[in-house]
Amino acid sequence: MDFSESTIRKDCPHCDPNSFALKFPLKETSNFWVVCDVHPLTRGHILIIPKKHLSCIGEYPEDVFNEFVELNDLFSNFIKKTYGSVSSFEHGKIGQTVFHSHVQMFPYIGSPETIVPESNSFLTAVHNLNDLKTIFQKDGAYLFFSIGNDKWIVDIKIGKPRFFRDRFAVALHNPRRGNWKEMHSDTVTMEEANREIHELTANWKKYSNKSI
């Protein structure tokens, strides 16, 4: 892939390979970085980030999308086997605080109504990740999350900054971790987070070595 000025933005922390956001790498491919979240919601929190400046999964070209699906499956299995459960979310151009696609994946199990308690009418089940491309082409935005193998989009009318991050933080009993900017200034919380990150890095190394 040719990472020209049109696909890389110097002011984007997810475009810059030397950014703090990419400080703890787990895996690099031709199109993606997979990293530990620097401000984890919980143990085992990772980000899958395209190298190209793309807004969300729905905007991925076919080759990038296909590679993402493989990484999504790989790290879903890793988190589930290592931590016992897996969930994910992506702000598809709604509620982003960094305007570069970053799919968040971490251990969590619970009902979708815990994350979106307003009404079932705000939730629509999706069958697979490819549906996000169709939804994005139609609506230009979406809010996506998964719990285990089940996937949903949320009515974007209720979207706001950190929509999923705040809600999952509460569901994970770590509400202080919802706002990553405030978390970054909390020395005690960041010390705890760094221990979780080092644990995650070690767990991935063990898992990936077994998979070879």
Image (tube, rainbow, N blue to C red):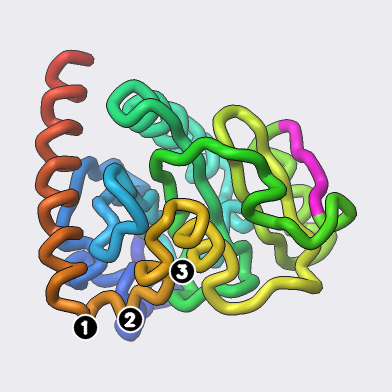
Q: Earlier in the sequence, mark 2 or mark 3?
A: 3
Classed neighbour count for the residue bearing mark 1: other residues with Cα under 10 Å, few (<14), some (14–19), many (≥20): few
At a point 84% along the width and 57% down the height, the residue shown is 119
Q: Which sits in the foreground, 166 or 66?
A: 166
Classed neighbour count for the residue bearing mark 3: other residues with Cα under 10 Å, few (<14), some (14–19), many (≥20): many
Helix, strand or loop at label 3? It is: loop
Classed neighbour count for the residue bearing mark 2: other residues with Cα under 10 Å, few (<14), some (14–19), many (≥20): few
Query: Residue 83 appears at what percent x and percent y?
Result: 32, 30
Residue 185 — which label?
1
Q: Which sits in the foreground, 202 or 26?
A: 202
Residue 100 — which label?
3
Between circles 2 and 3, the one closer to the viewer is: 2
Query: In which quadrant of the rendered view does residue 156 lie?
Result: bottom right
Q: Amino acid at mark 2?
A: Lys
Between circles 3 and 1, the one closer to the viewer is: 1
> Which residues are drawn in magenta?
123-127
Residue 96 painted magenta: no
- Look at the image and tell me whether residue 1 can be seen: no
Query: In which quadrant of the rendered view does residue 129 lie?
Result: top right
Q: Amino acid at mark 1?
A: Ser
Task: Spot the residue most to the right.
Answer: 121
Q: Is 168 placed left or right of 140 in the picture?
A: left
Q: Which residue is the site of mark 2?
A: 181
Which secondary structure type mostly characterizes the magenta part of the structure?
strand
